[in-house]
Amino acid sequence: MQNGSRLAAVDLGSNSFRLEIGRVDHGEFRRTEYLKETVRQGGGLDENRNLTADAMQSGWDCLARFGERLAGFKPGEVRAVATQTLREARNRDEFLKTANEVLGFPIDVISGREEARLIYQGVAHMLERSEERRLVIDIGGRSTELILGQGMTPSVMESFRVGSIAWSKRYFADGQFTRKAFEIAEIAAKAVLDEAFDAYHPDNWDVAYGSAGTVGAIGDVLVAAGWPQGVVTQDGLDWLLEKLVAGQSVDRLRMLGMREDRKAIIGGGVSVMRAVFSLLGIESMQHAAGGLRHGLICDLLGTSNTVDDLRINSVQRLATKFAIDTVHGARVGNVATQLLAPIISDPSCSEFAKRDRFLRKLNWAAQLHEVGSHISHSDYHKHGAYILDNADAMGFSLSEMHRLSLLVLGHRGKLRKLEPMLGEEGLAAQLMSLRLAVILCHARRDPDLEGMTLERSTQAPYFACLTTRIGWAAAYPQSAYLLKEEALAWQKTAWPLEIRGL
């Protein structure tokens, strides 16, 4: 990033939406503006896990205001992500369609572990350099992230579906603060977090840090009452619990340092915080200045591992975990990208403006196209698509993993199963290249591609034309037969394939 470049991070949290804007100053990010709105979208999920109309409208209104502030920013200067609420929402695509438009930039719904990575990155960036072993905790509206790390490197990351909004709705829905309600809420939170005990045992870390709103809200109340600044202790939590029980209800609660917008969710936040302290043996927690949006800025700055490096590592981990034939995956990837390259060089198609991105993602899909073969030989493409749709892969958003899953699902078999998604030219071109590469590599050896090209067709109504040299079909009759069958399959779509030379 050049000196003076503008950067912006947008965090669509379950409780608040945040926008951080700043400029690059000699390699460092200097904040110039910070906007926060309490949208509380996490409370807008109905019993069917759909966002209500009011919750969606509140989110759109906030993002429209953010979008006005981001007018003039370039795509590479802004990163926007959404977390647990939109991970859960069944109608998130409906919300995101309008949200992307009003914000003016694409919003990535990220997995829990990717959120944890970004949180740790943001926290570590704001701390002094140290070799201490860190436990970073982020209690959000609907999820809690726990991360172990040292320096700038996280080592263990997990996200749990427990948070201040969710627990307040479930255990303090009537707004009453009773000792029994707090006991039940804390026990329930421990039940969700119990599996974290071994990995995040006190022997595995030196200092605990708390990030985001819940620790800040609790810390503000404690400081106003005379407790030390920048730290939350077990004694402080015990004192706060007694004050909340004495206050009896949200309506009657009067405490210095507690904002009005925090009263409705403080019960759930304190319950989850106490559960974390008790389960992991925490006596005191330092308040960390950094968080998710600072991690996004680090990615934009390139001060951490680049996102592509993380994606490459994620693909390699999946390949190793599911015992993929990596040599064959690389072979198919090389052929697929070689076939796709001429098509996306066409300057008339705006979808292919980011040529390298299209090639990289196709290559990753090719490397993982057999990820389901460890489960089933005949239907491995279906199992592979399921694995990718449900895998936590660092560096990837959920939408990016879904696109990889579609390519893996569609790399063999009938195209009809992908018909609703094949309206996008970019996906069709990637899928065609992948399917052709799988066919050409069917013997699991490097194919003879001399004189073979895949180009945009000049002959209507064909979309693409695959040309082979004279004599190729006679030399490889099985491949020629499979290519003819493939051309027939594409004839039934909006992207007909013509093959010449067979």
Image: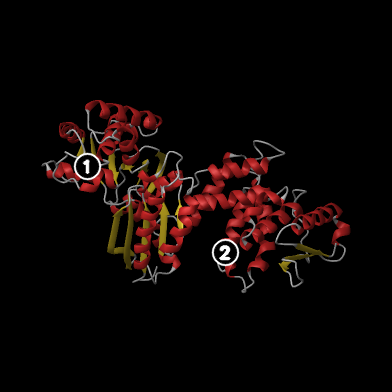
For the question of whether residue 87 can be seen, the reply is yes
Instruction: Determine whether 164 is above or below 129 in the image.
Output: above
Q: CA distance from mark 2 to mark 1?
A: 46 Å
Give the residue at x 36% y 47%.
14
Q: Left or right: 86 with respect to 497? A: left
Q: Residue furthest left?
A: 226
Q: Mark 2 or mark 1, which has the lower sequence index?
A: 1
Is 168 in front, or is 317? 168
Is 80 in front, or is 233? 80
Q: Left or right: 301 with respect to 283? A: right
Q: Position of residue 284 (x, y in %)?
A: 22, 37
Q: Quadrant of residue 7?
A: bottom left
The residue that label 2 is drawn on is 356
Q: Secondary structure at mark 2?
A: helix
Is 196 in front, or is 462? 462
Specify the amino acid type for callout 2: Asp
Q: Position of residue 112 (x, y in %)?
A: 43, 44
Quarter of the image where the N terminus is located: bottom left
Q: Position of residue 256 (x, y in %)?
A: 13, 44
Is 387 in front, or is 23? 387
Q: Residue furthest front?
A: 53
Q: Quadrant of residue 276?
A: top left
The residue that label 1 is drawn on is 218
Specify the amino acid type for callout 1: Ile
Give the residue at x 37% y 28%.
191
